[in-house]
Amino acid sequence: MKPLLLLLLIGCFITPARAAIEAYEFDSPEMEADYNQLVNELRCLVCQNQNLSGSDADLAQDLRRETYEMLQQGKSQQEVIEFMVARYGDFVLYRPQFKSSTYLLWLGPFLLLVVVLVVVLRRLRAATKPVEVDAETLADARNLLDQDEPDKKEESDK
């Protein structure tokens, strides 16, 4: 009896999974290919790390529907992309355009690499710099080495 009660309680708290299935009718295979390419290249603004085709967010569903309607109206891929960018900004694109507002986005990784290389090279140069040793310290080191050598010879003879 208790397992049945437990199952009923769990069943009350579990919300049913909701998956929207969108079935669009396309006039041609080319239009369907354009649609699929667009929803794969446009970012879901809610999920941020998913494209429109992989997101179940309400906004993603609306954007897929809007993309479909624009293609049905005869608009090109570029026109759809321009509309989305005008409405939502460059963030909607997985591959933002190269323009003055996105220079840092495109060039930032290369600039960071150059900075890291400069830092590494400076550290390597500093680490390989010869150490200045005065004659007295060098003589002391030689004396210590000379004193240690007879002890090693005696140990090897044993």
Image (spheres, grey):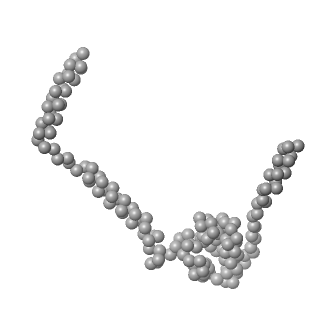
Residue at the (79%, 60%) spot, across then down: 16
Please tell me whether residue 49 is drawn above or below residue 34 in the rendered image.
above
Q: Can residue 154 be spotted in the picture?
A: yes
Q: Which of 38 and 111 is in front in this view?
A: 111
**Left/right of residue 47 with respect to residue 103 in the rendered view:** right
Residue 93, image x, y percentages: 56, 72
- Of the pair 154 and 139, the residue shown nearer to us: 139
Quadrant of the rendered image containing residue 157: top left
Q: In this view, does 90 lie above or below 136?
A: below
Nearer to the camera, 81 or 16: 16
Outermost residue, top direction? 158
Q: How many marks?
A: 0
Image location of residue 88, percent across then percent down: 59, 77
Figure quadrant of residue 59: bottom right
Residue at 75% across / 67% down in the picture?
Answer: 20
The N terminus - image quarter: top right
Q: In which quarter of the image is the C terminus?
A: top left
For the point 15% across and 29% down, which residue is it?
146
**Whether residue 37 can be seen here:** no
Coordinates of residue 133 in the picture (x, y in percent)? 16, 44
In the rendered view, does 67 fall on the left or right side of 107? Answer: right
Q: Give the residue at x 42% y 69%.
A: 107
Locate residue 56, reporting x and y percent. 69, 66
Q: Which of 60 and 33 is in front in this view?
A: 60
